[in-house]
Image: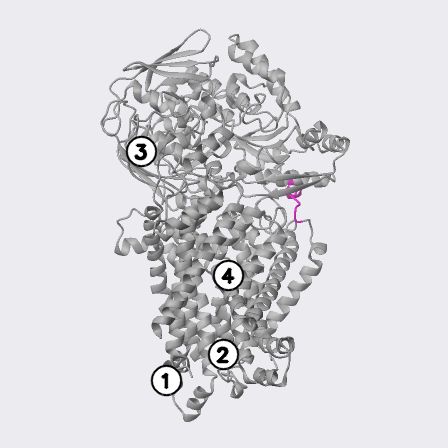
Amino acid sequence: MSDTPTPQNTNSAIQFDELPDAPPKRKIKLSLLGKIGVVVLIFWAIVVAIGPMIAPYHEADILDEELFIVPGSDEMYPDTDFQPPSKIVLLGSDYLGRDTLSRILFGARTTIGISFIATTLAYLLGVLLGIAAAVGSKRLDMILSRLNDALLSIPSIMFALVMIAALGSTIPLLILLTGIIYATSVFRIARSLGQEVMVSDFVEAARVRGEGLWWIITREILPNIAMPLATDFGLRFVWVILFISALSFLGLGVQPPMSDWGSMVKENLPGLIYGSVAPIMPALAIATLTISVNMIVDDISAHTGGKLAKRMIA
Amino acid sequence: MKEVKIFQQMYRDGHVSRREFLAAMGALGITATTAGSLLTSASALAATPTRGGSVIFASNLHGPDDTLDPLLGTSTIDYTRSNASRNGLIQIWDDMSLNAELAEEWSVNSNATEYTFKIRKGVTFHDGSGLTAEDVVWSMDRHRGEDSPSSIKSFFTNVTEWQAVDKYTVKLSLSSPDADMPYKLTQPQAKIVKANATDWLTAGSGPYLVDSFQAGVKSTHSRNPNYWRDTGQWLDGIEITAITDMNARLNALLAGSVDMITSISPKQIQKIEESGNNVLSVPAGLYGGICCLKNTAPGENDDLVQGLRYIQDRERIVRKFLKGHGTLGNDHPINVSYGADHCHELPQIPYDPEKAKYHLNKSGYSEAELFVAPVTGIIEDVCLLMQANLKKIDFNLKLKKVPTDGYWGAVWMKEPLNVVSWNMRPTANSMMGIQFGPNGNWNDTFWNSDRMGELLKDSLAETDAAKRHEMHCEMQKLVSTESGIIIPYHTNVLDAHNPKVQGFSNVPLGQFGGNQWMEHIWKNA
Amino acid sequence: MLWRALLSRLGISLVTLWVVSVLIFIGTNLLPGDVAQIILGQMATPESTAALRAKLGLDKPPYLQYVVWLQNVAMGDLGISKAGLGAGLGTPIVEILEPRIFNTLRLTGLVTVIAIPISLFLGLIAAMHPGTRLDRAVTFSTLSLISVPDFLVATMLVLIFAVFLGWFPAIVYLRGDETGWVLIKTLAMPILTLVIVASSQIIRMTRATVLNVMSSPYIEMAILKGVPRKRIILRHALFNAVGPIVNVIALNLAWLVGGVVVVEQIFSYPGLAKLMVEGVLMRDLPLVQACAMIFCVTYIVLIFIADMATILSNPRLRHPK
């Protein structure tokens, strides 16, 4: 981005308050920040793929005290917890004397994996049911909407607290729960978008042509709601990561000794007061990931315009 | 006073017991009360109490189940409130001796089936009415009967009758001999309240009145002007609350928002000391451990349990996880804090991965699943260390982390491998009895040994000190080799307080000196 | 017309409330253990648990307990908290709720009063000068703050302002008679934390919404006509952005009422969210239900207000074809 103010919607001539009759053509140009975002995302994608292979230790390894003996010192049992970065532990050690770097590398897979699958699940569920509510009978819409409202009105952390306490904290359940919780807002978006498209002129026209419901859904509704939902995906992905870290604050995150970034922040909080970097490093990992995702989302939404902002609220 | 310092260090390291320490102090010409406070603090020597001021006490847990009814007390905050506003018949002091409280004196018949209590005269409840034998009988009867929800109900199953002989005499009849009964009466649940009490705020006779009480929020207390005992009551007021988050609790102390915090983590000690606050570290029999159920796989396999015993790096646990504020566990509950009953002859089981590997191979298991909940301080860390060390010898221990709420009902004594924590009991016999008495309510490794039952019964009646010690040694050996319990460490009771607050006792049966600090602490201006 | 709409809305709300109560009922019944077991904890024996259960009225089948609860609620009686009842200390839930609702509303109110003007101001400023350093600074800092777990934000703030600087207390310990400056000081830490977390979201949304409206044809027209940019934003764009912005604010308020478990936990603040968590941990069903009902009503009312705002701010929705 240069310092000269750029006109921020070069293609705004075709923007109307309602959806255009056909998906507008878009060519996304990334700003500098957006490009940095892409680089960071690629970096984390690589870590997800090979992180455990390049980690100096295993995520569960509690390092031996001998490793930390300073040559020449007669201290046989030096402290291993909350150690500052050194040659032995490049990003310092955590509250148990485990290597923070290794745990971040292992944790990338857990954190990004769980959040990604959960967000995807939220979209599958939300879009499927949202469209069903939009095109289905009034009764179906009523049932789905009330159920959705009810779920939305229960604070999500309470809902998770009850379900995890009842069914046990396993990764599949964590994914399923988070998926359901975030599906509620996707449902709202998909339903209202779907309804708008259903009453639009081109669907009328398709109906008159005698096209079936399936044709309308796949050819008209899905393409038309795909873009707003895609940009929304990024934000919700971030919320899911933070949600899971809030769960770990309440002791409901992934099972030990598995590492995920949110629980790493939580379990190392006692080190903060000693100036340890152990809680900061995983927080930085979360921040770089979420900020870069959002930078990209910002770029995309600046170029697609539309009613994105309104969509992002729900 | 160099000797005092040396003894303090020895005591802290577990080289001398509480009784030995107090005896040594006596030999140095130091009175018992002073010696008691010397157990933890050297500054107590010169300090003189001052009257006035108030403290805010922050416990670790509270909620809508906070209660003023002693019957259902289960947490530090309940015990603290109970001790502030109520009295029991008998209480335990620093040297673990039994002392008169509302019972001026008591006597027992030769076979320990009948106790007679002389009730103190001139004691008034907070509503102004006087204490009589009727109140005692009513309070104690609440622990009996089918519809009693008392949490210590099973302590009193051998009671046939509580009887008010006259206005100030109570007779207790038992169906079976019970020399431990006076200790049971020191339980915080066994406080005496006004008969047929309806207003729990004024039902007690304790040193501090209950001015307000809001479950899950806080309670406020002011000095009882009509207290029957002159023990100081230095503070004008006490406020009792809880901060559930461990880091927040520490920050509240550091920022001066509260005066006392319970249940600190060993990791926080360095910061607390740097900041000029005091750590109260009282050696105790408190422990966290692993239960292997002996009546089912895999715990029924002795080699598996033995392997898991050898894999505990006990020295590192005490050194690093407890930062030295604890003692090595030897797979039985009776550590040095129990004084003469502790079997120092029993060799300490070492960390020995080779032997662990040998036994685990022999057991035929190469993996197991352990249920873990943060039921006490560092237990989760201990399990993680165990898991990491087992990984080195190719044994896959899966940890299943479950929430603490519901743990005691749904996991403990149900899942084949689980974690447990036990507070210290007043005597070695009561501790062993509650956990290893054959077919007992809390036999949490389902290990039933007839020999154990015999020893429990006989040691209680044995008056010869040497023979009694021998019996306790045999029991400790039995538990540490045959039962399913693994006890890697015993932890000190750890609390922290503003240095202005002084005069804490050292009863190791609960936080801040057995939760009975209200009467004798003071706050310097 | 309006009355009919309101009535149908009310009917829908009641159905939603009922669905919530059923969900909570099913959920809490799935939890291991019940109030009696949890109260007695490690020292529970089958006999004492059974005795306590009987005292608490838990010996009836769960669905029957639910039916009784539903009947009572329909009559306006929220019942008695199960925890503490065994000791004969049956505190009516209304009594437990009252101070908590007051606390939650007080905190929510203060946060709202501070956060909303700041967020709207910063959001608008950023939208008025898109692409400038100012805009990028606002965007980047709000993004960074959104990306950090709130418990880390809270803990850092406590370490800085309470522990090192000693300006504010580390926890909220209310004596009950605080007013004015003392009250603000007591509540400073949670207010600061929540303002930071809530503002970042509202700022982002305000900016995005206003920018979005700016790209609509009538604004283009106004720009072409030479109307000053400032005037366009304040007169036209802002008015049209009211709907979505009110929506964001409404959802943030709902979150402040029921979703701030972590913050209430860290500052030991006796609010509603913490109460519900404690209720769940205790398996105190009537208490959990009561909290859930409050959250649900809050949500419904706030969403209703947001919808009204959307309709009123949009001429086309105000006068449907």
For disc 4, the marked residue is: A147
Amino acid type at image mark 3: Trp
Instruction: Tell me, yes or no, whether the two marked residues, 2 and 4, touch with CB atoms within 8 Å.
Output: no
The answer for which chain carries disc 2 is C
Mark 4 surroundings within 10 Å by alpha-carbon count, few (fewer than 14), some (14 through 19), many (20 or more): some
Tell me whether the residue at label 4 lies in contact with that at label 3, contact meaning CB atoms closer than 8 angstroms: no
Image quadrant for the N terminus of chain C? bottom left
- Report if residue B243 is visible in the image: yes
Same subunit: marks 4 and 1: no
The amino acid on which the numbered mark 2 sits, given as a three-letter code, is Gly
Which residue is identified by label 1? C231
B81 relative to A202 in the view: left or right:
left
Q: Which residue is mark 2?
A: C131
Are dots 2 and 1 in contact, CB under 8 Å?
no
- Secondary element at tag 4: helix
Region of the chain picked out in magenta, as a range:
A59-70
User: For the residues carrying marks 2 and 4, which lies nearer the camera in this image?
Assistant: 4
> In the rendered structure, which amino acid carries the disc numbered 1?
Arg
Position of residue B520 measured from the top left corner of the image (x, y, whole percent): 33, 28
